């Protein structure tokens, strides 16, 4: 049974006439990456899947139930979201911030139990933030805040993780660390869907990819079908060169050409949409 | 969390009692503590009994409850607008109340009707701001804030107009009302019941408010029904502010400064901050009112002047200190 099913889902992006309906399913154990240029709708897709904004048409099913029929609190026990930006106008400590991940499990009059505290501490430990537990959030660096946001969602422990650029602000070591952790956390019961800007990180950590083109087209499927130089060049309007290194394909921008790729042709994407549903 | 709550209560409850006792002893005539004790037991001098039971005690109780209401309303508004600088009046509520009260004074109505008119004005202002800011999309704090600020400016113009056309013998009463004054407060039962209701409602919602303060998207992703919660907070904050305003006019600064100071001491958890605001707001206003009654006794100052005079330097000092840390 699929964990999340996008049923002819058309995102609601203002001013965008054509958007190809998304029709894909996320199974437990899968780690999906969303790739695409700025403004292609990655964040909108994640927000829509989290039920934070309505789609233009189609529906989203979480374990075969349309998400708009699931009460918010129940939904928050099933899926968690890490946003691109965290709002902390008010002072709160690192521990308090991790603890709010337990909110969906508590009735409104209940206090956090010892078990909730334990889960928050565990999450802080896994993100190497335990020593900072009593620090005010405002004193953290951008990367530490990003890891803290991941702590909150780890404490929330949903079956589906939605992550909007989880590697934002992270140094090289923590990028690998965080993505390995997410990958490990998914196991065989959970799934993740994350927007990424780095093709090579996506290639290394994602099992599946969803490519959103600037003109509204989309393709999705297993990573091996999506990681093709031509397709990625069209995606980013940028010439790429690829090389193999220790069994992995690495893509880098072609240093010889700063010129963008010829306007990408819709018919060529029709061809590549045969990759759909190869998952 | 429960340890911090206990610590907060252990500090603020005794201070509340001490502040109220101090306020009872001070005034045009000083009453020693032992005489207060005697009056409370039903003995003691009749003059003291009259002074204490008919004048000072209701006034002190009114001051405490009004201060508590304003501070809680301020704390709620700050969460709702996600802006630490919001106060209970930021959405124009006090302006509406003031226009109502001034109109009632101009018409020569009695104290009860002035309060009623103030409440009606506050209600109209609340509905106006809510109706205008409540668009089709989500409830953006900046939109709400802007609407409130502009509506408040409109009320401000009306207030100036009313002051300009009022006969001069009405002006002192009007100015006292505008600055906030406890002399004409009614029975303390009304603000006290509002305060108790507010506490009973907000304490269990404290954790949800903590989440809401992190932004509507994050709150929704954590299972909060954001729209419903925001409505509840807005209505509750407006209601208790209106009760405070009809008790004592628009006393400034309590609602801004008390939650702010408390956040620096007790942290951000609303389950501690809201009850702490109720107590500390009460303490501040009781002390400020005591000063207002005694500084130029037997004349009285409007208490709003004292809260502002105390509030401005304290606030600036705290801001300055937090910059150094």
Image (spheres, coloured by chain):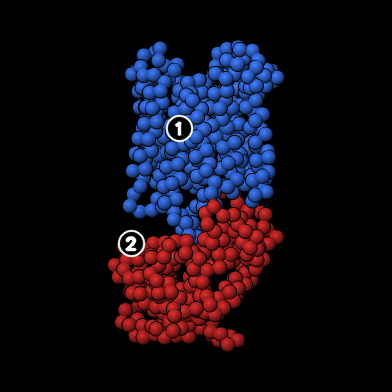
Q: Secondary structure at mark 1?
A: helix
Residue A12 vs residue B242: left or right? left
Q: Chain of mark 2?
A: A
In-front residue for pair B305/B285: B285
Q: Is residue B213 above or below residue A176?
A: above
Q: Is residue A219 above or below residue A136?
A: below
Tell me the number on the disc at residue A14. 2
Residue B109 vs residue A169: left or right? left
Q: Secondary structure at mark 2?
A: loop
Residue B104 position by quadrant = top left
In-front residue for pair A110/A87: A110
Residue A121 position by quadrant = bottom right
Tell me the number on the disc at residue B243. 1
Q: Is residue A60 above or below residue B61?
A: below
Camera-near label (2 vs 1) is 1
In-front residue for pair A56/B188: B188
Q: Colour of chain B?
A: blue
For image coordinates 66% across by 44% down, the residue present is: B6
Q: Residue B198, percent across and down?
A: 50, 40
Q: Is residue A274 visible?
A: yes
For image coordinates 43% across by 32% down, the residue present is: B94
């Amino acid at each position: 049974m699929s964990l999340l099913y996008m049923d002819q889902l058309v995102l609601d992006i203002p001013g965008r006439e054509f958007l190809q309906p998304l029709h894909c399913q996320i199974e437990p154990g899968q780690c999906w990456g969303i790739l695409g240029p700025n403004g292609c709708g990655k964040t909108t897709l994640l927000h829509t899947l989290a039920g934070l904004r309505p789609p233009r048409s189609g529906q989203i099913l979480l374990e075969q139930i349309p998400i708009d029929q699931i009460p918010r609190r129940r939904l928050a026990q099933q899926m968690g979201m890490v946003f691109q930006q965290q709002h902390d106008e008010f002072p709160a400590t690192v521990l308090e911030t991790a603890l709010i991940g337990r909110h969906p499990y508590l009735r409104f009059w209940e206090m956090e139990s010892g078990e909730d505290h334990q889960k928050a501490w565990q999450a802080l430990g896994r993100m190497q933030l335990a020593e900072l537990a009593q620090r005010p959030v405002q004193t953290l660096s951008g990367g530490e805040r990003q890891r803290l946001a991941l702590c909150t969602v780890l404490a929330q422990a949903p079956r589906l993780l939605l992550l909007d650029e989880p590697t934002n602000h992270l140094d090289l070591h923590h990028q690998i660390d965080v993505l390995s952790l997410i990958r490990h956390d998914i196991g065989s019961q959970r799934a993740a869907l994350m927007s990424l800007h780095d093709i090579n990180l996506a290639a290394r950590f994602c099992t599946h990819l969803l490519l959103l083109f600037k003109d509204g087209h989309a393709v999705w499927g297993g990573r091996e079908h999506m990681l093709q130089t031509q397709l990625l060049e069209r995606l980013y309007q940028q010439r790429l060169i690829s090389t193999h290194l220790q069994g992995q394909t690495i893509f880098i921008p072609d240093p010889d050409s700063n010129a963008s790729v010829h306007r990408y042709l819709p018919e060529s994407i029709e061809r590549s949409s045969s990759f759909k549903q190869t998952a | 969390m429960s340890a911090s709550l206990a610590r907060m209560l252990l500090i603020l409850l005794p201070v509340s009692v001490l502040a109220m006792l101090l306020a009872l002893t001070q005034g045009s005539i000083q009453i020693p503590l032992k005489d207060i004790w005697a009056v409370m037991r039903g003995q003691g001098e009749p003059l003291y009994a009259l002074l204490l039971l008919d004048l000072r005690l209701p006034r002190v109780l009114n001051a405490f409850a009004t201060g508590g209401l304003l501070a809680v309303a301020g704390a709620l508004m700050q969460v709702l607008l996600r802006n630490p600088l919001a106060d209970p009046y930021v959405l124009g509520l006090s302006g509406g109340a003031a226009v109502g009260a001034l109109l009632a004074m101009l018409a020569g109505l009695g104290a009860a009707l002035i309060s009623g008119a103030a409440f009606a004005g506050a209600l109209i202002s609340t509905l106006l701001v809510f109706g205008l800011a409540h668009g089709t999309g989500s409830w953006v704090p900046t939109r709400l804030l802007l609407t409130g600020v502009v509506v408040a400016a409109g009320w401000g113009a009306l207030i100036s107009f009313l002051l300009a056309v009022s006969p001069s013998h009405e002006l002192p009463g009007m100015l006292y009302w505008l600055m906030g004054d406890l002399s004409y407060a009614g029975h303390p039962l009304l603000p006290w019941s509002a305060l108790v209701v507010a506490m009973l409602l907000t304490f269990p919602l404290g954790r949800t408010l903590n989440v809401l303060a992190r932004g509507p998207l994050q709150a929704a992703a954590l299972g909060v029904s954001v729209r419903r919660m925001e409505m509840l907070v807005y209505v509750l904050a407006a209601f208790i502010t209106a009760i405070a305003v009809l008790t004592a006019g628009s006393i400034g600064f309590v609602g801004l400064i008390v939650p702010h100071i408390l956040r620096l001491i007790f942290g951000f958890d609303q389950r501690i901050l809201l009850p702490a605001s109720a107590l500390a707001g009460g303490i501040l206003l009781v002390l400020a009112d005591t000063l207002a009654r005694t500084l130029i006794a037997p004349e009285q100052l409007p208490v709003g002047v004292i809260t502002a005079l105390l509030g401005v330097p304290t606030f600036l000092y705290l801001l300055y200190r937090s910059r150094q840390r």
